[in-house]
Amino acid sequence: MRKRLKFTFFIAFLTVAMVILFQVTWVYNSYKASERNFITSARFALRRAITSYQLQQNELPTSLQYKEPTLTFFQSTIPNRDSIALDTPKVIKRFNAKFTTVKVDEENKDALLEILGRLLSQQMHTPLNPDSLNLFFKKELLKENIRVPFRLIVSTNAKVATDHAISVPVNFYRSPVIVQAIPKNQSLALWRQNIIPASVSLLLILLSAGSLLIMGKMIIRQMRLNKFKNDFINNITHELRTPITILKSSVDALETFGAAADPEKLTRYLKTNGVILNKMDQDIDRILEISKYEQGVIRAQLKRVDVAQLAREVSNRFNLTLPDAVLINYNLSQPMVNTDPFILDSVFSNLIDNAIKYSNHPVHIEINFQPIINGWQLQVADKGKGIASFHLPFIFDKFYRVQTSDVHEVKGYGLGLSFVKELALILDGEISVASKPDQGTTFTIRFYDK
């Protein structure tokens, strides 16, 4: 069973680790892809901005603005061979020029405009102005849905731009020119783009880890509960077998050894049998009562109760002799509180019985009633053996019993404190415990006014 459980946990941890690794890798790759797309889009916007800037700085042929754009090229010159015309003083042309007009396709128009703009800028010796260029760059960035501020730098005699830099080389200049765009808060912008995928990935990681944690706790708790159940069965079997053995011995004595003929022995045997049967009946009623409260069959019936008097009545039922003592401290402003006397009776009985079982002799128990904000609290404290801190989170679990050499022989089913917690919840109360070994234990129940 343990090997199978270890193997199950190993597979679960391996699965969660792989899910976490996959999610982290996916987020990293998504971030890198966004970074590449950002650089590519910004570089494309910068190239278009340079083209727009150069076109505005120079006057282009009007034929490019026609419905069907054309461009006329100078092809060659032909000397004027008219000798008579050459001797005429009013001759105008010594050469004839030959031109060619071509039609520009719409698909190639943008590329042609870019080349013309750069050629004209070279011929006119027009330098690049970063401030003016930045205005065109901002407009192009908005088209790419990029809202990160940039700083433009125009460098001459610069090296070729790298793939990770947002830079564009400007050709046709006598000296190489590179326009570089330096972003501000690029990482922040990229994380804004990836915040939703990263959040979903983080949520999946948390859900996977949380599911594993909950599953592990459930399995461990189920194993512990199964152990407690087996201990409870063994314990209750032992507790029932002992009185049954006594009853059998008593009946056998009455039948076989003639004890029925002796009035004194008969009375003693019957009295012993009555005590044992009453004890068994009380244990059965207690278990059935716990089941009814857990199923919600029995509900609280609130009324005005003198809780201090109720505590005295319950403590008087226990066989305490001097110098044993139960001290009751009542510090509430009202003599009576609104509660269910039968439920509170069971709470007192279980806590006092528990304190007596685990107390040193002489027994000393304090029952304190104190006011709190919007209610009151009940404390039952003893100066007994105490409980180690390891056991405190589990003592209200059903069937749980502290297994130590000191208290192993204390009789019980591990149901008392679980029952008290259930009763406190029915009264809308909150129960807690504070304890240290050899210093005693204090149970505190806080009841809040409705």
Image (tube, rainbow, N blue to C red):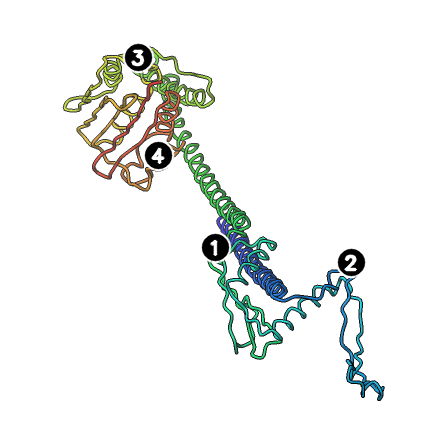
Q: Which mark is residue 67?
A: 2
Q: Residues within 10 Å of mark 4 (few under 14, many from 20)?
A: some
Instruction: Tell me how far mark 1 sits from mark 2, CA to CA.
Output: 46 Å
Q: Earlier in the sequence, mark 1 or mark 3?
A: 1
Residue type for callout 3 = Thr
Front residue of 276/300: it is: 300
- How packed mark 1 is, by other alpha carbons closer than 10 Å (few <14, some 14-19, many 20 or more), is few
Q: Residue at x 52, y 76 (%)?
A: 156
Question: What residue would you read off at disc 4?
Answer: 395
As rendered, which of 394 and 134 lies closer to the eye? 134
Q: Earlier in the sequence, mark 3 or mark 4?
A: 3
Residue at image point 38% right, 12% down: 301
Q: Residue furthest front?
A: 89
Question: Disc 1 designates what residue?
Answer: 188
Q: Residue beneath label 3, please?
A: 267
Label 2 and label 4: CA atoms lie apart by: 91 Å
